[in-house]
Image (spheres, rainbow, N blue to C red):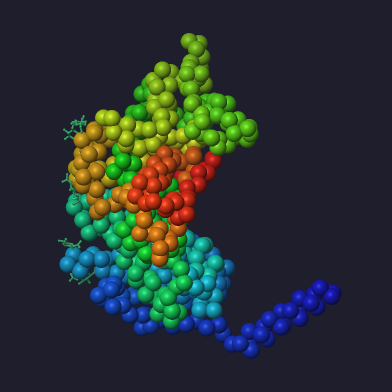
Amino acid sequence: MVGLLRFLTATFLLSSLSSVFGAPDVGNCQISSFHFDPTEVDAVVSSATLFPAHARVNFTNLFSSIDVADLPAFCRVAITITTNATANSTAHADVWLPLPGAWNGRFVAFGNGGFGGGGLFLHPVNVADLGFVAIPQGFAGMSTDTGHSSTVGDGTWAGPHNDNAIVDWAWRAMRLSTLAAKEVVKQYYGKAQKNSYYLGCSTGGRQGLKEVQRFPTDYDGVVVGSPANAMSHLQAWSVHISNLIMPAGSPQFISTSLWADVIHPEVLKQCDSLDGLNDGIISQPLACNFRPATLACRPTQNTFTCLNLEQIIAVKKIFSTYFDLNQTYIFGGYFPGGEMQFADGGLLAVTPFPVPLSYYQFMVLNDTSFTQDQLNFSIIELSDQIDPGTQNAINPDISAFASAPHNGKLLQYVGWGDQLISPGNSLHYYEAVHAFTQLHTATSDVNDFYRLFTVPGMAHW
Ligand SMILES: *[C@@H]1O[C@H](CO)[C@@H](O)[C@H](O)[C@H]1NC(C)=O
Ligand SMILES: *[C@@H]1O[C@H](CO)[C@@H](O)[C@H](O)[C@H]1NC(C)=O
Ligand SMILES: *[C@@H]1O[C@H](CO)[C@@H](O)[C@H](O)[C@H]1NC(C)=O
Ligand SMILES: *[C@@H]1O[C@H](CO)[C@@H](O)[C@H](O)[C@H]1NC(C)=O
Ligand SMILES: *[C@@H]1O[C@H](CO)[C@@H](O)[C@H](O)[C@H]1NC(C)=O
Ligand SMILES: *[C@@H]1O[C@H](CO)[C@@H](O)[C@H](O)[C@H]1NC(C)=O
């Protein structure tokens, strides 16, 4: 009874307080409130919508979805950006703004994934991160559609020769959406953000590193997960590793159940306790030289429980730390521990992951008859040269981002069990920045501005 009274009193006090202070300040959440200087960024606001607290926020597009009714109030501003006036190419971005009283003074942008660029519908961006991450924590959040509409695996929009769409996806949509969103923030709150942050993984990681390398003062703090930054080499490795076991049904093919029920348990047996813990999670994959020969089939053995010679050779190559071709480093390999996802949601499925084929067919060779068994060293060299839209984000010089007065900070993470982008790629970029920093500065310490975190047991998705 006392509890109930207390509850009623508190409820009464709260409701009378909000009537004393009136409705919350919703700011100018109207199309007419926003204007862009076309010499800075050629954009228009296409809609501005106020979502009251606990309004249903229910959007689904090709890239992401959200369906909740527990968010604080926010103003959703949709922007259309002309990315190349001559070509009349556009990108779309959303800026979700907490009400002025709830704003933490900070701005955060979110990256995309694969070839995914928004969707066909009204809310073509990464609505999930805007609604689940930015708004509940009081950030003004931004996401771009990267200039086109497609699912993560579909790169057909890039061809034939859709150069402006490629450039937009490669970096331009993110750059211009950043400029436009910061303008929206300034006009809505009457002042600029204190700090700008970026979060993204995979293609989002690549977009983040591109910003750090090319537009070093756009973001103060950048977090990238398993970045697809070395696209021309990542795609070659993806095809190479799939070719090691393809075609399905051949002697070298390894089924999902062989990975899960035969190889994974043996990997745990050989590698799990190297960190002193038999916990099913491999945290020292570099210390383990996995030997698949221990799984070789005896003449009388059921082949669902062991490996033939072709499979043993394939597994050895799949786990080799580096993929070298023609004495050139191309990419890292798979690491022991991720076996459960290699075939199931990874690069070793019966149907190969579609991104590499799109990359070669629609961005590099412009030849839809290309099949992945045709990959050769000259194609890798060609893709390095063309680097469609300058999408590779591999410059080890991030000094403009890191040094004073900007003092940017970069955090990177990757799961040792990543099944789409070798963790070796994250190690490689980190080492490249580390080496570059020491080779070119007398005192600058990479630890002051760039840290890499490897996560045991974590996959790409
Ligand atoms: C959310 O939207 C979808 C259509 O996009 C609809 O099917 C669903 O019923 C909606 N959910 C709620 C709770 O309104
Ligand atoms: C804009 O598009 C036109 C037509 O496709 C092209 O010639 C030009 O190079 C593009 N400009 C930039 C800066 O991308
Ligand atoms: C640009 O495209 C929009 C729609 O996408 C169209 O309304 C407009 O007329 C086009 N402008 C030019 C100059 O082609
Ligand atoms: C394929 O098309 C892209 C986009 O137009 C272009 O950059 C590239 O050079 C083309 N590749 C070849 C081999 O011509
Ligand atoms: C590599 O592949 C391309 C495209 O299929 C082909 O034109 C070229 O002749 C090949 N090069 C070598 C060295 O095999
Ligand atoms: C290997 O690299 C050398 C030196 O770059 C080059 O001359 C040769 O053609 C390459 N081999 C293949 C098969 O591409």
217 versus 28 height, above or below: above
Q: State whether residue 384 appears in this view.
A: yes
Say which residue appears at 35% left-offset and 59% top-offset.
400
**Residue lying farthest to the bottom in this orientation:** 20
- Residue 442 x/y as whole percent: 39, 51
- Residue 104 x/y as whole percent: 52, 72
Left/right of residue 365 with respect to residue 118 in the rendered view: left
Q: Quadrant of the N terminus?
A: bottom right
Q: How many marks?
A: 0
438 versus 163 height, above or below: above
**Residue lying farthest to the top in this orientation:** 299
- Residue 153 x/y as whole percent: 35, 48
89 versus 113 height, above or below: below
Query: In which quadrant of the rendered view does residue 273 lie?
Result: top right
**Residue lying farthest to the right in this orientation:** 1
Left/right of residue 293 with respect to residue 440 in the rendered view: right
Where does ligand 2 appear, by image quarter? bottom left
Say which residue appears at 48% left-offset and 26% top-offset.
289
Say which residue appears at 19% left-offset and 51% top-offset.
160
153 versus 132 height, above or below: above
Q: State whether residue 154 appears in this view.
A: no
- Residue 42 x/y as whole percent: 27, 73
